[in-house]
Amino acid sequence: MIGGRGMHGQIDDAISLFHEMANRGIKPNYIIITNILSACSHAGYLDEGKYFFNLMIELAIEPKPEHFACLVDLLSRAGDIDKAYEVITSMPFPADVSLWGALVNGCRIHNRLDIIKMIQQRLESLQTDDTGYYTLLSNIYAEGGEWNESRVVRSKMRSLGLRKVDGYSMIEVEKRIHTGSELQMIADAKIWLGGIAVSGSSGDFLLRLPKVELCLLRSLLLSFSFCQVAIFSWIEKKLDT
């Protein structure tokens, strides 16, 4: 329940549930602490997040990497980059890419390229198949005018054979699940807006659309995947009527 509340932005309710549980004499375990820390991190509840992290130590629950990751993410998002870096360097185990990634993301949000340069060698020595991490680091260098460093990161991605995974959306229409990459959805939509409409059969309704609306549909198809599936759903329902 605490995790569900936190995922849906009901942070105050999640915190109330935690305290209610504690008042009933139920001792939280490391999973519950992870959920409440994650909720505080996503909501930007800095003071509350620090409180729960310290509470975990008071309850003799040994912090695990995921707990430190939540704390680092919380501090980084709030702009306390120096403290986040201090947390990473003081951990009893080496930081993995998720921890460094949280710090790097905070550096980008708050324009702390100085920290990026300070830990540059550590960042470049990390090995991961997470393309998001490399893309983030490359973009930070580019935004700071460090084009050579940006190219080095991109080159490392290529040498490792990594490429960004295409995003996609899913939708259920008439008890059928439609899914696919953005490019596939665009291709499908072009068939609906092109071939069927031109055929003049069940797609006649498209031919009756004003030119402005048809152009709007086509422009939306080239944007976000959720727009593509929404239009796909609308057209298929129209064809069935």
Image: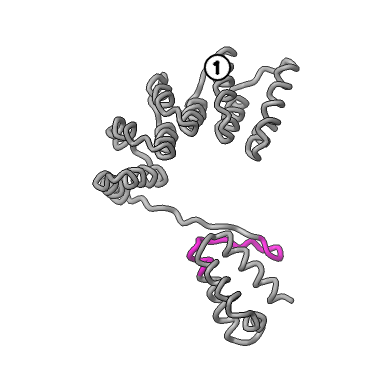
Left or right, residue 179 beside residue 120: right
Q: Is 182 inside the magenta-drawn segment? A: yes
Q: Nearer the viewer, residue 30 or 5?
A: 5
Q: Nearer the viewer, residue 153 or 170?
A: 153
The residue located at (62%, 80%) in the rendering is: 210
Determine which quarter of the picture holds residue 54. Answer: top right
Q: Is residue 52 above or below residue 128?
A: above
Residue extending farthest to the left is: 148
The residue located at (29%, 30%) in the rendering is: 118
Left or right, residue 170 beside residue 134: right
Quarter of the figure that contains the C terminus: bottom right
**Residue type at numbered disc 1:** Asn
Residue 199 spot, x, y in % from top left: 59, 86
Residue 43 spot, x, y in % from top left: 59, 34
Residue 136 spot, x, y in % from top left: 39, 44
Q: Is residue 86 above or below residue 188?
A: above
Q: Secondary structure at mark 1?
A: helix
Determine which quarter of the picture holds residue 194. Answer: bottom right
Q: Is residue 172 above or below residue 139?
A: below
Q: Dot 1, crowdedness within 10 Å: few (<14), some or many (≥20)?
A: few
The residue located at (71%, 26%) in the rendering is: 16
Q: Which residue is mark 1?
A: 54
Left or right, residue 156 beside residue 183: left
Q: Nearer the viewer, residue 1 or 103?
A: 103
Q: Is residue 27 above or below residue 67?
A: above
Residue 228 spot, x, y in % from top left: 57, 64
The residue located at (27%, 33%) in the rendering is: 121
Q: Which residues are magenta?
A: 172-186
Q: Is 103 inside the magenta-drawn segment? A: no
Coloring applied to the structure: one colour
Quarter of the figure that contains the N terminus: top right
Left or right, residue 35 beside residue 116: right
